[in-house]
Image (spheres, rainbow, N blue to C red):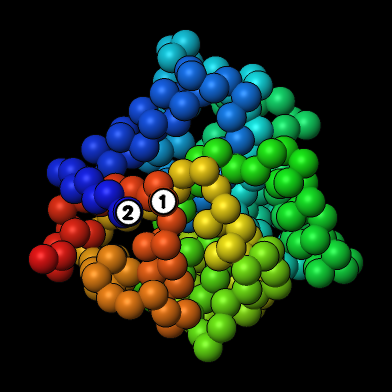
Amino acid sequence: MVKVRILGDEGAVAQAVARRVQRLLASAPSAVLGLPTGRTPVELYARLRRAHAAGRVDFSRATTFNLDEFLGLPPDHPGSYRSFMDEHLFRHVNLNPRRIHFLHGGAVDPDRECARYEAAIRRAGGIDLQIVGIGANGHIGFNEPGAALSADSHRARLEPGTRRSNAALFGGRASAVPREALSMGVGTILRAGAIVLMATGASKAPAIATALGGPVTTRMPASFLQLHHDVEFVLDREAAGTLR
């Protein structure tokens, strides 16, 4: 069953999700977290940094797996999602570097890299809490709408709108954004113990309404979250603006 929480603004959404992470790590310090990138979680990570600095959250025993990475970019590339996570969270909290897991965008064999990632998730015991955002076209991770979706981690072709939304990482030039990425699959996401989807802003409202109220379809990847037993959409008023 999907739970929906509608809050006043972006800050309230970030705070609610940060508190959920804090509660999880307080009750299960060795929890496995699935983490997103993009504009939406920036404020979430700011809240977690502040909570850690104030002694309210301890990451020392936690394990993390990120959703996705651009294909062709090494981890130290300034446009990589790994660099994004280092800037916004990893270097500011006490995560053990050996417990940080990422798809390697510079892998010579992308298919083998995806298989390695799936095996690493299994060895960790699975993801306890997966946090995701949603694209304006309904993608989660880099699972773009299409005739079919990949269940497991895979190589993904990015839609033009997805590349435009990531242009800020590449000097504002959508043409510089890689055309492909590596991503957890929808099945990988759905195997998490619990899922939280964060969405803010009016541009996400149509996708949210369709993901929650429409059929489960590969043309709206986020609609597959309807199938999960423990999923919560945490939305600001604008993102919830077209919900009935």
Mark 2 near mark 1, Cβ–Cβ under 8 Å?
yes
Q: Is residue 86 visible?
A: no
Per the image, the residue denoted by label 1 is: 229
Viewer can see residue 115: yes
Instruction: Decide which of 187, 180 is in the foreground and name it.
Output: 187
Which residue ends up furthest to the right in the rendered image?
A: 108
Which residue is rendered at x = 81% and y = 68% of the image? Answer: 110
Point out the tag, 2 or 1, that comes first from the N-terminus: 2
Residue at x 15% of width, y 68% of height: 242
Mark 1 burial class by Cα count in 10 Å: few <14, some 14-19, many 20+:
some
Return the residue found at the far top.
55
Q: Secondary structure at mark 1?
A: loop
* Amino acid type at mark 1: His
Q: What kind of residue is marked 2?
A: Met
Q: Position of residue 135 (x, y in %)?
A: 41, 67
Task: Report helix, strand or loop for mark 2.
Answer: loop
**Quadrant placement of the C terminus:** bottom left
Q: Residue furthest left?
A: 244
Query: Which quarter of the figure is the N terminus placed in?
Result: bottom left
- Residue at the spot of label 2: 1
Whether residue 132 is situated above or below residue 149 in the rendered picture: above
Compared to residue 5, the image places residue 21 above or below, namely: above
Q: Is 106 situated left or right of 183 in this image?
A: right
Asked where in the image residue 187 lies, by quadrant, the reply is bottom right
Above or below 38: residue 243 = below
User: Which residue sits at x=60%, y=43%?
Assistant: 127
The quadrant where residue 72 appears: bottom right
Viewer-closest of 221 and 133: 221
For the residues labelled 2 and 1, the Cα–Cα distance comes to 6 Å
